[in-house]
Amino acid sequence: MTSSARGGRRRAIRRLAPKVPEITVMFWIVKILTTGMGEAASDFLANRSVPLAGGVGLVGFTLAMWLQLRTRRYVTAVYWFAVAMVAVFGTMAADGVHRVIGIPYPVTTLFYAVVLATIFFRWHRDERSLSIHSIVTRRREIYYWSAVLATFALGTAAGDLTAFTLHLGFLASIGFFAVAILVPAVAYRLRRINAVGAFWFAYVLTRPLGASIADYLAKEHDLHGLGYGDGTVAVTATFVIVILVAYLAWSGTDVQRPPKAADSASPAHQAPAPVPAQYGAPYRVPVVEEAEPSDRW
């Protein structure tokens, strides 16, 4: 390989600062709010015009991804704008497959589960880690956002599956997913699952939980909802999200920070996952950004 080619490969894997937030209680609150907002906004737009909804969703998603990928560090407002647009676009994609093409919810749920599993398989095969603390290269970031988009589509299909196909309704679906989302937390505490697995398990379940809450608040009484309307729920959720994101940006509590010095001698910090050597000169992620932590989200 020529020196210019090697130089191009090295530039392609330049290390970035962490591009995702620290996982805190506030993270999960905002995440669930974005899922509900995405569900309500998608339904509101689709009920006016399906082409309009698709256009707005695609433009918003494209703009958000462009902003997120061009930054070289985590920016609170940019990151959560990206999550919000993925929520809207992912909901539209999942709903469109069922409503426009007519594919049943069990089939779409299985399909998106396979898509997500494939992304995780390729991500782990190429990078040897699914940890959000190892997302310090462009390729890892692209894998991350691909997985996030797939989780929204899967969660949308799963939520509709329980509410409509299984006839649980919105309120029972809220209870079901609220209990289900506790499973990875309990399993992690009991050391039955590692932090990375617990994170992604819970992340997938935030989508149907948030969407079920939004549908229960927005849908008509005939559908066993409270009838506030999709527009009202979408605007209210957006308002709350903006306030919480502004607080996070001001406080900086969501920025990933290096582990304490006392922790740096642990095996988890001594063996970070390297970027594959075939992409240029050997490269290792700094020890403060461990690839497969056993005790962190």
Image (tube, helix red, strand yellow):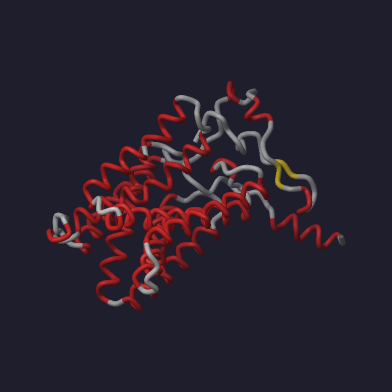
Quadrant assignment, res 108:
bottom left
As drawn, 290 above or below 117? above
As drawn, the residue found furthest toward the right would be: 2
Taking the spot 37% from the left edge, 66% from the top edge, the residue there is 92
Q: Is residue 65 left or right of residue 170?
A: right
Taking the spot 47% from the left edge, 51% from the top edge, the residue there is 75
Of the pair 171 and 126, the residue shown nearer to us? 171
Of the pair 15 and 54, the residue shown nearer to us? 54
Q: Is residue 95 left or right of residue 256?
A: left
As drawn, 180 above or below 235? above
Quadrant assignment, res 236:
bottom left
Of the pair 282 and 48, the residue shown nearer to us? 48
Quarter of the image with the N terminus is bottom right
Taking the spot 70% from the left edge, 46% from the top edge, the residue there is 275
Quadrant assignment, res 259:
top right
* Residue 146 drawn at (x, y percent): 53, 57
